[in-house]
Image: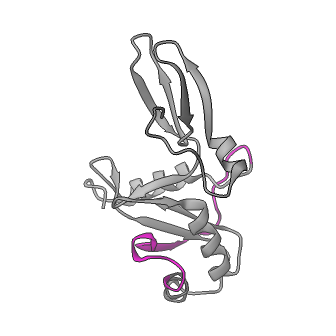
Amino acid sequence: MAGPQLTQGYLGDEALTSKRLIMLNHPMFGEMRWYFTGDLAFEDATGAFHHLGRIDNQVKVLGHRIELEELDAHLRRVCGCDSVVTVAWPFRDGNAAGIVAFVCGTVFTSTHILAGLKECLPPYALPREIVEIESMPMTQNGKIDRKALLRLLAERSLPDGT
């Protein structure tokens, strides 16, 4: 994103400002201040931009931007284990309508976990469901495979995605 309407930076955070806001030269518009949003896109030969997804795990649920890693941190604390992850689900008309949490290896019940999360998260960020899973699917890089969990949810859901 670029243009004169962009902020001058993050208040009191020069490191984040220099990481997210930089001056670049655009062939059609000259030098402009650009904000790195976390979206992955490319510009084709006609100048049209094509959105490919995100480079982070920020999602928009019911109009609210949510960092899934932040939810995961709260979930780890409440569950007392590291093998947890959240995903945006279900999707309706291309938009996320909620959050599902996956937990593995915790002794706590879903009721206890949800009660703990209610103490530290706003209602829109609370998981609609907490799924206990025997083992987390992993990527080749050793990270939890969120896409595999989304496929699992899609396989068990009704045709309308609920």
Can you say which quadrant of the picture contains the C terminus? Answer: bottom left
Residue at the image position 52 percent from the left and 56 percent from the top:
149
Residue at the image position 45 percent from the left and 70 percent from the top:
125
Q: Is residue 60 left or right of residue 120?
A: left
Location of residue 109 with respect to 4 vertically, above or below: below
Q: Which residue is more in the foreground, 11 or 38?
A: 11
Q: Which residue is more in the foreground, 133 or 21?
A: 21
> Which x, y percent locates residue 11?
61, 57
| Number of numbered labels in the structure image | 0
Query: Colour scheme of this structure image?
Result: one colour
Location of residue 149 with respect to 19 vertically, above or below: below
> Which x, y percent locates residue 133?
58, 69
> Which x, y percent locates residue 155?
40, 54
Q: Main secondary structure of the magenta part?
A: loop
Write down the region rendered in magenta.
118-141
Q: Which residue is more in the foreground, 131 or 42?
A: 42
Residue 122, quarter of picture = bottom left
| Residue 122 falls within the magenta-colored stretch | yes
Q: Is residue 10 left or right of residue 160?
A: right
Q: Is residue 34 left or right of residue 97?
A: right
| Residue 33 falls within the magenta-colored stretch | no
